Image (spheres, helix red, strand yellow):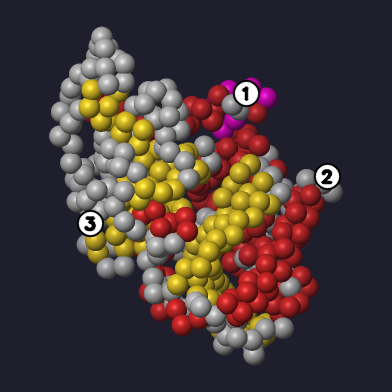
């Protein structure tokens, strides 16, 4: 319903949240609220990226520059003969912007855990919320009064102020700049001091919605999908198919579920391109005996195996005698930047957030089987061991980034018997970057 709003007047728009679609392990939520669709937002984003092009080149020149870099990697060459992507993929500022648009602003992206603790307790109960950032996209995820999960660009429609920060509970989102107020369904409820405004349609000034879904314990966003009130998930579980493909059942059987107890989060800011961390994860355990001698002692590295699927690769290895690792370790990489690690009684997830051409943040969330959640000594020692591995990886990634920026290096080679997951990752990247 279109309406004129007076000064400080609370309004009712008649907008009702759409019903969620739920099938099996995945729940998909639609949040149509504004005539400014995500498709329009993406067009505006493309214009913004072009306007900030390298050396003030035109949009076409920037695109041409980045596409040239993309084609310096050939995904059709067999791994035995292939060169790795050029160092410019990891160092070029314009390529980073191009990559955000082609990789992270398309498809489903993991942004949080759907759990009753820490950062994500905010969407267990009605009025819970949490905020985040992906590239230049500020977002807020909440559960409205009716229990429906919603997601929006976390930007006031008046003068672009960030609306919410952190996490917690709210009955509405009030802009800290001029007091414009939005419901948890994204509708504009109050606009202050706008007496005399003309050509103002309430429905056009709600928060810009983002598609949001939940799979198992994970919250996902999709920035590219065009919002449609009558959009249907279909007979197959859409998100599960698009995000995990044929691996969803494998991961469920491998122990990825909501029965685990969430412990806490650790965050690391690393001076490397986000892909450096992913490459390190995907080398098939190649670096483990050299860089992680403590971890290697608890694994039977001769049993290490890697299988690639549509957008997922799964590495597995038999464990040794340590209770922390158990009898088998499973490492699942979900393109483009999410890892699920299941070993012994533990599961941890790693979300790699790009912060710039030479910087990323890696967010670790730790889970444990419920019968051990109160075993403080076991948890403390396990986390000491985990922290040691993370610090060893940070040193490696920092060194690789510095090497990538050296004039002595352009491209490298793959070890064909172990680095096929890394090669698969680069092939998926190339496909996205050519879209």
Identify the residue position indicated by label 2 in the image. Answer: 407
Number of marks drawn: 3
Q: Residue 261, how many percent across, how many down?
A: 45, 72
Q: Which residue is mark 3?
A: 21
Q: Report the quarter where the N terminus lies.
A: top left
CA distance for labels 3 and 1? 45 Å
Q: Which residue is mark 1?
A: 57
- Pick whichever, 298 or 414, lies toward us: 298
Residue 131: image location, x then y, percent = 45, 45
**Residue 428 vs residue 246: left or right?**
right
From what the image shows, is residue 31 above or below residue 419? above
Front disc: 3 or 1: 3
* Residue closest to the eye, 369 or 414: 369
- Give the distance between the C-alpha atoms of the residues marked 1 and 2, in whole angstroms: 24 Å
The secondary structure that most of the magenta stretch takes on is: helix
Pointer 2 local density, CA inside 10 Å: few below 14, some 14–19, many at least 20: few
Residue 119 in view = yes
**What residue span does the magenta drawing correspond to?**
55-63
Residue at (51% x, 44% y) in the render: 134
Residue under the point 18% across and 41% down? 16
Vertical position of residue 181 compared to residue 363: above or below = above
Contact check, label 3 and label 1, Cβ < 8 Å: no
In this rendering, position of residue 101 left or right of residue 221: right
């Amino acid at each position: 319903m279109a309406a004129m709003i007076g000064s400080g007047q609370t309004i009712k728009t008649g907008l009702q949240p759409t019903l969620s679609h739920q099938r099996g392990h995945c729940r998909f939520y639609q949040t149509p609220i504004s005539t400014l669709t995500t498709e329009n937002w993406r067009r505006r984003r493309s214009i913004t990226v072009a306007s900030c092009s390298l050396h003030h080149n035109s949009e076409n020149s920037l695109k041409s520059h980045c596409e040239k870099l993309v084609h310096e990697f050939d995904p059709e060459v067999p791994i035995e003969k292939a060169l790795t992507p050029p160092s410019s993929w990891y160092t070029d500022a314009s390529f980073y912007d191009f990559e955000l648009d082609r990789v992270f602003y398309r498809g489903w992206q993991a942004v949080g855990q759907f759990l009753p603790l820490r950062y994500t307790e905010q969407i267990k109960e009605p009025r819970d919320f949490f905020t985040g950032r992906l590239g230049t996209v500020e977002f807020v995820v909440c559960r409205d009064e009716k229990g429906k999960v919603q997601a929006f660009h976390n930007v006031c429609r008046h003068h672009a102020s960030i609306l919410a920060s952190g996490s917690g509970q709210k009955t509405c989102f009030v802009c800290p700049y001029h007091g414009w107020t939005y419901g948890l369904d994204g509708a504009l409820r109050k606009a202050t001091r706008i007496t005399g405004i003309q050509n103002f349609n309430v429905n056009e000034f709600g928060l810009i919605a983002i598609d949001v879904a939940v799979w198992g314990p994970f919250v996902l966003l999709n920035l590219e999908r065009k919002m449609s009130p009558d959009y249907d998930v279909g007979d197959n579980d859409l998100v599960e198919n698009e995000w995990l493909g044929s691996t969803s059942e494998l991961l469920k059987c491998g122990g990825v579920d909501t029965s685990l107890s969430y412990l806490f989060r650790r965050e690391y800011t690393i001076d490397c391109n986000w892909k450096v961390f992913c490459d390190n994860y995907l080398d098939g355990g190649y670096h483990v005996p050299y860089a992680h001698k403590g971890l290697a002692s608890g694994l039977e590295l001769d049993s290490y195996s890697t299988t690639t699927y549509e957008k997922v690769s799964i590495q597995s290895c038999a464990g040794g005698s340590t209770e922390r690792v158990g009898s088998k370790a499973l490492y699942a990489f979900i393109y483009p930047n999410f890892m699920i690690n299941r070993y012994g009684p533990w599961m941890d997830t790693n979300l790699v957030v790009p912060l710039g051409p030479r910087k990323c943040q890696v967010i670790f969330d730790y889970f444990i089987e419920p019968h051990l959640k109160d075993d403080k000594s076991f948890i403390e020692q396990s986390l000491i061991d985990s922290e040691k591995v993370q610090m060893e990886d940070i040193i490696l990634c920092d060194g690789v980034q510095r090497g990538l920026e050296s004039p002595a290096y352009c491209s490298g080679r793959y070890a064909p018997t172990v680095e096929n997951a890394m090669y698969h990752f680069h092939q998926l990247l190339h496909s996205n970057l050519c879209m």
